Image (cartoon, grey):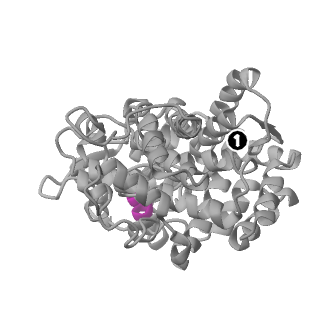
């Protein structure tokens, strides 16, 4: 690495990267794109997404950027905002441990919003997406764990910069322009974890996608900004790292391997906060192996590492939406229903039998374990089910298996409408400009039947 500033070195890496030389990275990116589209189609008729549409569409400009699942187009900035929100609305979208947040629902909406106005091919869009994930992940590693622990939502704060990096790579901007764009993205970096459990959480993703795109558009137009946003006593790491940042990690080992390969994205099996997933897998596996009678349960404990349940801000959920951030709800529902699909996290009141069982769940923390951090090895949950006769079932899960059948997840979200049916195959095989336009045409279609199916599945 040269003696140039850290920001300049990062911008140079973004400009010069060629992840298409790594077939595994490309294949994993294709899967992540399918996963994102599934989540966005399903989330496109979430009540929060519809509220965002109601507010912003009357103010939107003209354009051919797609509003996924809406059968209409708009200007790129509005499309990035709405699609980013929709992709995160159900909390079903991917996560990355280095970020401790959700990369794809910020990066892809920004890229798709400008895909038609560029001459880019499908593979160039895939390349830009991988670079965006790399940027966001390396910055997450560099910031350290205190950024999240102090209340920032990394999907929002790092997503702005990841989206800007991806768009800059797609537009083939020069490194000096990219450096300014990254700084313009960073100055819009915002989002607080106190919004978890509210419509504002997925709005973070939409705002970050729009902010990253805005930053790149301004920089490409010659708009000025600091070329060294990472450095110095009032730079990004100093302001957001809370003294725990290791700035060199932003560029070291770049692409060796790509962060999308290792530690890799987790494509979710369940439409709820990732912090519940170890508990979900534990209780569902116990239920599949044993005849668990809820009436005979005396108590349930869920043991986390310190900080492992920081995102789980709801202890007494009133609706299924609340339940996305409640390990109590996830465990109780897993025991009673034996599954955790989209329907149980809808905006319906919690069923009495689930509420009663959830009240038996107690959270604990293993203070001898390493604190939950960006290192995936620090993640675990132990679920103990204690029965009235003194017997106990116990299961520890520390590695998330993620979505086992991506095609099933897509079609569960999208329904059987032929408008959507070809999308997974298109994404898995697309290479050329024509292929990318085929995907955009499919996403722009007015899928009336799908709208009905999805609405029923989440209502």
In the image, residue 246 above or below residue 155 = below
Quadrant of the image for the C terminus?
top right
| 300 is within the stretch colored magenta | no
Is 277 positioned to the left or the right of 319 in the image? left
In the image, residue 416 above or below residue 205 = below
Number of callouts = 1
Element type at mark 1:
loop
Q: Which residues are magenta?
A: 278-283
Is 96 positioned to the left or the right of 300 in the image? right
Among the 4 quarters of the image, the one containing residue 351: top right
From the viewer's side, name the closer residue of 405 and 359. 405
Residue 57 position in % (x across, y down): 74, 26
From the viewer's side, name the closer residue of 212 and 181. 181
In the image, residue 164 above or below residue 400 = above
Q: Which residue is mark 1?
A: 44
- Determine the residue positioned at 58% across, 33% down: 349
Residue 157 position in % (x across, y down): 41, 38
Most common secondary structure along the magenta stretch: helix
Residue 265 position in % (x across, y down): 47, 63
Q: Residue furthest left?
A: 368
Q: Crowdedness of circle 1 by 10 Å Cα count: few (<14), some, many (20+)?
A: many
Q: Is residue 409 visible?
A: yes
Residue 32 position in % (x across, y down): 58, 62
Is 274 positioned to the left or the right of 126 in the image? left
Q: Is residue 325 visible?
A: no
- Determine the residue positioned at 51% across, 45% down: 164
| 279 is within the stretch colored magenta | yes
- Determine the residue positioned at 82% across, 61% down: 438
From the viewer's side, name the closer residue of 158 and 184. 184
Quadrant of the image for the N terminus?
bottom left
């Amino acid at each position: 690495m040269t003696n140039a500033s850290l920001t300049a070195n990062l911008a140079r890496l973004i400009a010069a990267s060629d992840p298409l030389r790594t077939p595994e990275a490309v294949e994993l990116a294709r899967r992540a794109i399918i996963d994102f589209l599934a989540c966005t189609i399903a989330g496109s008729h979430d009540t929060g997404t519809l509220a965002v549409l109601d507010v912003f569409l009357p103010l939107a400009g003209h354009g051919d950027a797609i509003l996924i699942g809406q059968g209409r187009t708009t200007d790129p900035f509005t499309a990035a905002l709405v699609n980013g929100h929709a992709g995160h609305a159900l909390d079903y979208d991917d996560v990355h441990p280095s970020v401790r947040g959700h990369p794809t629902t910020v990066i892809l909406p920004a890229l798709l919003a400008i895909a038609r106005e560029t001459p880019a091919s499908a593979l160039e869009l895939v390349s830009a997406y991988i670079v965006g994930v790399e940027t966001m992940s390396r910055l997450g590693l560099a910031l350290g764990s205190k950024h999240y622990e102090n209340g920032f939502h990394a999907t929002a704060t790092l997503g702005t910069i990841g989206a800007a990096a991806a768009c800059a790579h797609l537009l083939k901007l020069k490194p000096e322009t990219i450096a300014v764009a990254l700084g313009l993205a960073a100055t819009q970096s915002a989002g607080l974890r106190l919004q978890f459990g509210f419509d504002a959480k997925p709005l973070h993703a939409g705002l970050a996608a729009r902010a990253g795109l805005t930053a790149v558009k301004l920089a490409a137009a010659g708009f000025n900004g600091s070329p060294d946003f990472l450095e110095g006593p009032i730079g990004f790491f100093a302001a957001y790292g809370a003294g725990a940042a290791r700035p060199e990690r932003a560029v070291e080992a770049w692409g060796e391997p790509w962060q999308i390969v290792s530690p890799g994205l987790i494509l979710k099996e369940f439409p709820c906060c990732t912090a519940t997933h170890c508990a979900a897998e534990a209780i569902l596996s116990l239920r599949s192996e044993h005849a668990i009678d809820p009436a005979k349960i005396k108590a349930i404990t869920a043991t986390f590492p310190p900080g492992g349940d920081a995102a789980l801000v709801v202890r007494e959920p009133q609706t299924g939406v609340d339940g996305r951030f409640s390990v109590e709800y996830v465990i109780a529902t897993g025991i009673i229903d034996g599954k955790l699909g989209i329907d149980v996290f809808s905006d319906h009141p919690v069923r009495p039998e689930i509420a009663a069982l959830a009240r038996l769940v107690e959270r604990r923390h293993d203070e001898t374990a390493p604190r939950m951090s960006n290192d995936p090895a620090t993640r675990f949950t132990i679920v103990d089910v204690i029965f009235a006769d003194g017997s106990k079932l116990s299961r520890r899960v520390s590695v998330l298996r993620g979505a086992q059948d991506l095609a099933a997840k897509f079609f569960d979200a999208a329904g059987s409408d032929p408008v959507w049916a070809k999308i997974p195959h298109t994404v898995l095989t697309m290479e050329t400009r024509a292929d990318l336009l085929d995907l955009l045409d499919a996403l722009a279609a007015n899928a009336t039947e799908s709208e009905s199916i999805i609405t029923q599945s989440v209502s």
